[in-house]
Image (tube, rainbow, N blue to C red):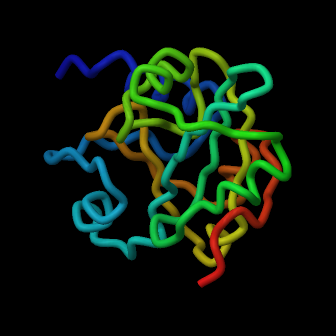
Amino acid sequence: MNYPEGFQRVAQALAERGHPHAPRWLEVAARTSQEAADALGVAVGQIAKSVIFRRRADDSAVLVVTSGDRRVDEKRVAAITGPLGRADAEFVKTRTGFSIGGVAPLAHTTPPTTLIDRELFRFDEIWAAAGHPNGVFRLSPQQLESLTGAPVADVVQER
């Protein structure tokens, strides 16, 4: 199969970094955390969802990687990154090279400011998007930290 460019870019980035798990192509598109969890047979919290914001100061992308069962608290993120605005589909595609539903935590066309939510560390194994709604890859929260070089922060709403 000839995979889409974003999926290939993630596969190459993972291989270059010596990541032990190649991305998997799912038979169904997993645009939401619940769809991904259902397709993989894992808890929705094990889905490392990528949420993109637009930083107002420089119009750059801010990526928050959090658990699929949590909601990002925009005020907590803004306290770290500066004021944020909404990122529409065109902004996400232009800045990251990925479409919404397939934004990977790495291999962006323009590297974003990235934050990893502490809630992901509840799990030994998590799954992240691999550059396409049908693409995912397995990793640990610690591997996510080393692959992205991103800081870990408390950036979700209180339960």
User: Where 150 sits versus 103, above or below?
Assistant: below
Q: Give the x, y percent position of residue 37.
A: 32, 66
The residue closer to the viewer here, 32 or 150, is 32
User: Where 34 sits versus 21, above or below?
Assistant: below
Q: Is residue 89 left or right of residue 144?
A: left
Q: Residue at x 66, y 50 (%)?
A: 144
Q: Quadrant of residue 19?
A: top right
User: Where 124 sits versus 62, above or below?
Assistant: below
The residue closer to the viewer here, 158 or 96, is 158
The residue closer to the viewer here, 21 or 102, is 102
From the image, which quarter does the N terminus lie in? Answer: top left
Q: Give the x, y percent position of residue 83.
A: 77, 40
Q: Is residue 129 left or right of residue 55?
A: left
Q: Give the x, y percent position of residue 157.
A: 63, 72
Disc tally is: 0
Residue furthest toward the bottom?
Answer: 159
Q: Residue at x 48, y 26 (%)?
A: 92
Q: Quadrant of residue 101?
A: top left
Q: Is residue 122 left or right of residue 67?
A: right
The residue closer to the viewer here, 98 or 73, is 73
